[in-house]
Image: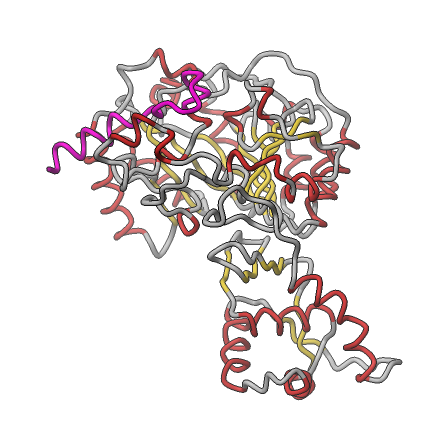
Amino acid sequence: MYSLSIDSSRWILRRDPLLNEEFIAYDVYTGDKYQLSSTSFLIALLLREVPLSAEQLKRVLKSLNLSLNSELHSFLELAEKIELILKLPPKSSSKPFSEIIPEIAGTLRDELNPPLPKRADPKVPVASSPRTVEIHLTHQCNMRCLHCVYDAGKHSDQLPPGDWISFLGQLIDLKVTKVIFSGGEPFLYKSFKDVLKYLEGKRIRVEILTNGTLITDELMDILKSPNFSIVISLDGTTPEVHHILRLWGYDVVTSTIERLSSKGIEFHITSVVHKGNLDEINNLVELALKHGARSINFLALDPLGRAKSLPHLVLSREDIKRLSSRISELKEIYSKYIHIGFLDPLQPSYKDGSELDPESEVIYCSAGTTRITARWDGKLFPCTYAFSGEEFALGTIYENLGKIWLSDRLNLFRGEVKLKDLKECFACPARNVCSLKVCRLRPYYDKGDFFGTPSGCEVIRSSLTHSG
């Protein structure tokens, strides 16, 4: 006989009544997300609060008029498969079993009935609290990549680590599933080690987007924490190709990849694809496989920021079709060994595609509905593209993020804007298949026009014309 329990340091259980994915279990070790039924969610909450034997669990469910043996069996089967459940030695309690459940009733009630955030349109799906938070600790970077969207590299002030640690504590309390450190180069933040040590082993997934040139052996000892993941930029398998956009650093980056691999630290590779490295795709996948990367993700060169001056490197429609075909072939060959990702500009789909309806007349994206971003000065924005527009600031990291999220400060991104307000997009023949239109801060960042057309829509229109 043993007791069943949920590893609360590894698993986040969330209910978001306004999302399509209403009940989820999120694994901070892998970044995997599993949808649960309402009954399975309740079972998971019970086991997280109190270790119970299978018989005790059946009694509790019966007392709640949920005597569902088949659903309990399905839950236990899934839970064992994904390692959601721990099997513990039976533990005697000083309190009678009948007294324990009433004690946790308040906690269960709060988690089953989270507060609902305000929104301008009831058709917009909004999480009860942010699921993802991106933090730019600094705008500084030790590289001057020719394609940098944010023009990183300039000096920026840095807040003390205690301020960020206090904010991160809020995120954990709000059950934020993932925090992403980007920038700028996050390892240039002087107290990054202190921030990482605080997050070590915490119930939140930590992703660090880095150029891979500043990771010391001392930092690697911290990065071994199972809730950490490193995403390294690598655009080629030779210095000549990698340096087309990055200018330098190939030997350092590949050495970092080798060291991460040798220490068993989870890492991923991101490659920006352009005309100069289009023939490197196979080699990059093989390099990622050789060193044990968890995934490799390809992104087409985005003509924003500094990349506006690189039209000769931007992929054509034919280039993208060729790239998409090649990646499909590689997925067939290597899918058992590595995840290969590609956001195809000719078949646009948003990151949070499960929550996006491209045919909707209401304009929204993940900004302000499942995601929020913090700038290096502590100001909060719905998205990094809003950093240049102070009018989009929502507050600061020193305020109560939960209250900000539940308020109407984000209504502009929760249904206030309709498709008919976007004159060019509304008249476009691709309006019902293109998801680029949902991002309003991208054209604002690019052209200063919140209601304008986003960069990249010319490719979508061209594809539609050719397919017609």
Please determine whether, in this image, residue 60 is positioned above or below residue 407. below
* Residue 220 belongs to the span the image colors magenta: no
Q: Is residue 415 left or right of residue 98?
A: left
Residue 232 visible in the snapshot: yes
- Residue shown at 31%/36% (left/top)? 283
Q: Is residue 211 left or right of residue 50?
A: left
- Number of numbered discs present? 0
Q: Is residue 346 left or right of residue 255?
A: left
In the rendered image, the quadrant that contains the C terminus is: top left
Q: Position of residue 297 (x, y in %)?
A: 39, 39
Closer to the camera in the image, 135 or 140 = 135
Magenta part of the chain = 443-468
Q: Position of residue 43 (x, y in %)?
A: 62, 74
- Residue shown at 56%/49% (left/top)? 127
Closer to the camera in the image, 403 or 43 = 403
Residue 1 visible in the snapshot: no
Q: Position of residue 352 (x, y in %)?
A: 44, 46
Report the magenta stretch's main SS. Answer: helix
Closer to the camera in the image, 343 or 125 = 125
Quadrant of the rendered structure where residue 112 is? bottom right
Quadrant of the rendered structure where residue 105 is? bottom right
* Residue 457 belongs to the span the image colors magenta: yes
In the rendered image, the quadrant that contains the N terminus is: bottom right
Q: Residue furthest right?
A: 94
- Residue shown at 71%/24% (left/top)? 190
Q: Position of residue 236 (x, y in %)?
A: 36, 28
Closer to the camera in the image, 25 or 115 = 115
- Residue shown at 75%/35% (left/top)? 399
